[in-house]
């Protein structure tokens, strides 16, 4: 499919870009998307949660009441989970939530997400550009020219550009990443996907392996 290339003023240029059908017009696989998003979100978790169990509580182990004749259940330690201040039974422990996902499944998920965006006409191809200095005003002006002010956008660059990244960092709902770091979650989380001209070739090269 062919897409017209826009400049940073939001106007059409004479150029057009061919988006490969194998990447942008494939049959989406919803299950691969589910697995990849689940993996991405699981990897964001620190897993440092911890509660003290009875073996870790600093309390006396002296038997504080007699075994029989109290009318209540027998008890031999204040560390028991049934008492206030006692250890927690089966409390959370530090753990790693990440899980392995095959490279082909990840690639299929990204292709599926890109195909959904293409079907929704939510992909814009932008001429390669740069800012002379990192200024939030420049990025705000760019979004205004593209009629995307207030929308959740993902700008994908062919290579790292510090000025563009820093210009967007203070804007809500705006995210800038390199084509090599493109992931399924970010694609689906954005209302509009903005691809720089050079990023299209990088994405197709990575996903057509």
Image (spheres, rainbow, N blue to C red):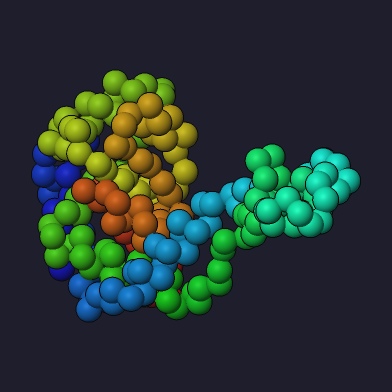
Say if residue 145 shows up in the picture: yes
The residue shown at (35%, 69%) is 34
Assign the N terminus to one quadrant of the image.
Answer: bottom left
Which residue appears at 55% of the width and 69% of the height?
99
**Residue 47, percent from left and from top:** 60, 52
Q: Say whether residue 52 is visible.
A: no
Q: Residue at x 30, y 51 (%)?
A: 189
* Tally of numbered discs: 0
Relative to 154, residue 185 above or below: below
- Residue 45 percent across, percent down from the top left: 54, 52
Instruction: Indicate the position of residue 105 as horizontal and vertical percent values.
Output: 42, 76
45 is higher (above) or lower (below) than 184:
above
Q: Is residue 59 above or below residue 113?
A: above
User: Height in image: 139 above or below 151?
Assistant: above
**Of the pair 170 and 88, the residue shown nearer to us:** 88
Q: Quadrant of the C terminus?
A: bottom left
**Image position of 84 (left or right of 206):** right
Q: Nearer the viewer, residue 29 or 148?
A: 29
- In the depicted view, which residue is nearer to us: 139 or 201? 139
Residue at 21% x, 48% y: name it: 191
Q: Residue furthest front?
A: 69
Provide residue 56's location: percent of width, then percent of height: 79, 48
């Amino acid at each position: 499919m062919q897409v017209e290339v826009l400049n940073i003023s939001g106007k059409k240029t004479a150029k057009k870009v061919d988006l490969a059908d194998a990447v942008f017009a494939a049959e989406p696989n919803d299950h691969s998307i589910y697995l990849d998003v689940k993996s991405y979100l699981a990897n964001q978790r620190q897993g440092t949660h911890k509660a003290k169990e009875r073996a870790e509580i600093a309390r006396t182990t002296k038997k504080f009441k007699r075994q029989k004749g109290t009318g209540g259940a027998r008890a031999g330690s204040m560390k028991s989970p049934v008492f206030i201040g006692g250890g927690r039974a089966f409390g959370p422990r530090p753990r790693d939530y990440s899980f392995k996902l095959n490279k082909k499944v990840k690639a299929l998920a990204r292709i599926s997400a890109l195909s959904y965006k293409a079907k929704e006409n939510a992909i814009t191809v932008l001429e390669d550009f740069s800012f002379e200095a990192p200024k939030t005003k420049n990025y705000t002006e760019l979004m205004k020219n593209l009629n995307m002010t207030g929308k959740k956008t993902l700008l994908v660059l062919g290579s790292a550009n510090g000025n563009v990244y820093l210009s967007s960092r203070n804007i809500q709902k705006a995210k800038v990443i390199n084509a090599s770091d493109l992931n399924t979650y970010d694609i689906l989380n954005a209302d509009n996907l903005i691809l720089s001209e050079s990023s299209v070739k990088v994405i197709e090269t990575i996903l057509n392996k």
